[in-house]
């Protein structure tokens, strides 16, 4: 048996975590309970911190979704250091995997919020390009691409390109709809953009 350190604790397992390719595991009730759009950030943090501490490092899609959601909740509460630390933990635990792109998309969003538009675009553009070439994404990749397109759309708005921004938001709704919370966010961003630009549409 070998002890492997996870985020916030140590788990004793008979194999290396790096040897595990995937894990089939039901989403804990506490995690599922805060996945609905509009869940307060404080409730998200309270529910997800224990789960992330216990399961971070396992190659399960819901674990990555929980880590990303937790980082976003930290950021929305003004806890940028904890948000960055969580994204860094994703990169450390899942190097070279598609999961690592979750951290890149999250950090791009933080750059966007800080007004570093060029930095956000540079981080998210490769993910958008990859998404445009993936005609049959897995559910986990679909959620990742959704996040990238949400950031991309907001960058385009900052660049005064409303039509392209709207296309980015609608792409989430029509192609990368695996995560309901991200679809809801795309809906809100698209509505806000249309309210500010009457008559705006896509070709």
Image: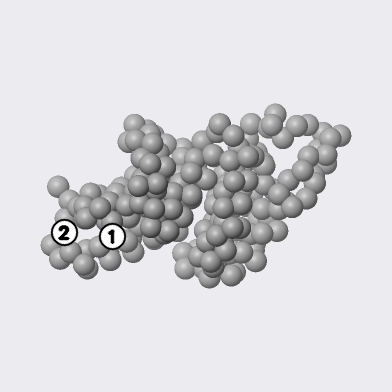
Mark 1 vs mark 2, CA separation in Å: 10 Å
- Asked if 110 appears above or below 137 in the picture, the reply is below
Res. 120 mark: none
Q: Residues within 10 Å of mark 1 (few under 14, many from 20)?
A: many
Task: Name the residue located 73 percent from the left edge and 45 percent from the top edge.
Answer: 6
In percent of width and height, residue 179 lies at: 45, 52
In percent of width and height, residue 110 lies at: 46, 55
- As drawn, the residue found furthest toward the right would be 1
Q: Is residue 135 visible?
A: no
Task: Name the residue located 78 percent from the left edge and 31 percent from the top edge.
Answer: 15
Q: Is residue 55 visible?
A: yes
Residue that numbered label 1 is attached to: 190
* Helix, strand or loop for disc 1: helix
Count of marks placed on residues: 2
Q: Nearer the viewer, residue 112 or 173?
A: 112
Location of the N terminus (image quadrant)? top right
Image-based side of 82 in relation to 108, left or right: right
* Helix, strand or loop for disc 2: loop
In percent of width and height, residue 37 lies at: 46, 64
Image-based side of 63 in relation to 112, left or right: right
Q: How is the image coloured?
A: one colour
Task: Name the residue located 52 percent from the left edge and 61 percent from the top edge.
Answer: 75
Q: In the figure, residue 136 lies in which quadrant?
A: top left
Q: Nearer the viewer, residue 109 or 24?
A: 109
Q: Residues within 10 Å of mark 2 (few under 14, many from 20)?
A: few
Res. 200 mark: 2
In percent of width and height, residue 26 lies at: 64, 49
Task: Name the residue located 70 percent from the left edge and 29 percent from the top edge.
Answer: 19
Image-based side of 19 in relation to 12, left or right: left
First in sequence, mark 1 or 2: give its number: 1
Q: In the figure, residue 192 lies in which quadrant?
A: bottom left
């Amino acid at each position: 048996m070998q002890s492997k350190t996870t985020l916030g604790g140590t788990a004793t397992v008979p194999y290396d975590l790096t040897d595990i390719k995937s894990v089939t595991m039901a989403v804990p009730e506490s995690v599922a309970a805060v996945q609905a759009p509009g869940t307060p950030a404080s409730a998200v943090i309270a529910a997800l911190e224990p789960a992330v501490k216990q399961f971070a490092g396992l190659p399960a899609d819901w674990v990555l979704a929980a880590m990303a959601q937790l980082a976003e909740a930290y950021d929305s509460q003004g806890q940028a250091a904890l948000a960055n630390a969580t994204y860094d933990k994703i990169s450390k635990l899942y190097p070279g995997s598609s999961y690592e792109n979750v951290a890149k998309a999250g950090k791009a969003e933080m750059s966007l919020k800080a007004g570093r538009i060029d930095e956000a675009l540079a981080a998210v553009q490769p993910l958008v390009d990859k998404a445009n070439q993936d005609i049959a994404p897995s559910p986990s990749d679909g959620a990742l691409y959704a996040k990238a397109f949400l950031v991309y759309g907001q960058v385009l708005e900052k660049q005064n390109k409303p039509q392209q921004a709207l296309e980015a938001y609608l792409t989430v709704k029509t192609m990368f709809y695996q995560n309901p919370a991200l679809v809801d966010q795309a809906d809100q961003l698209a509505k806000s953009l249309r309210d500010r630009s009457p008559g705006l549409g896509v070709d």
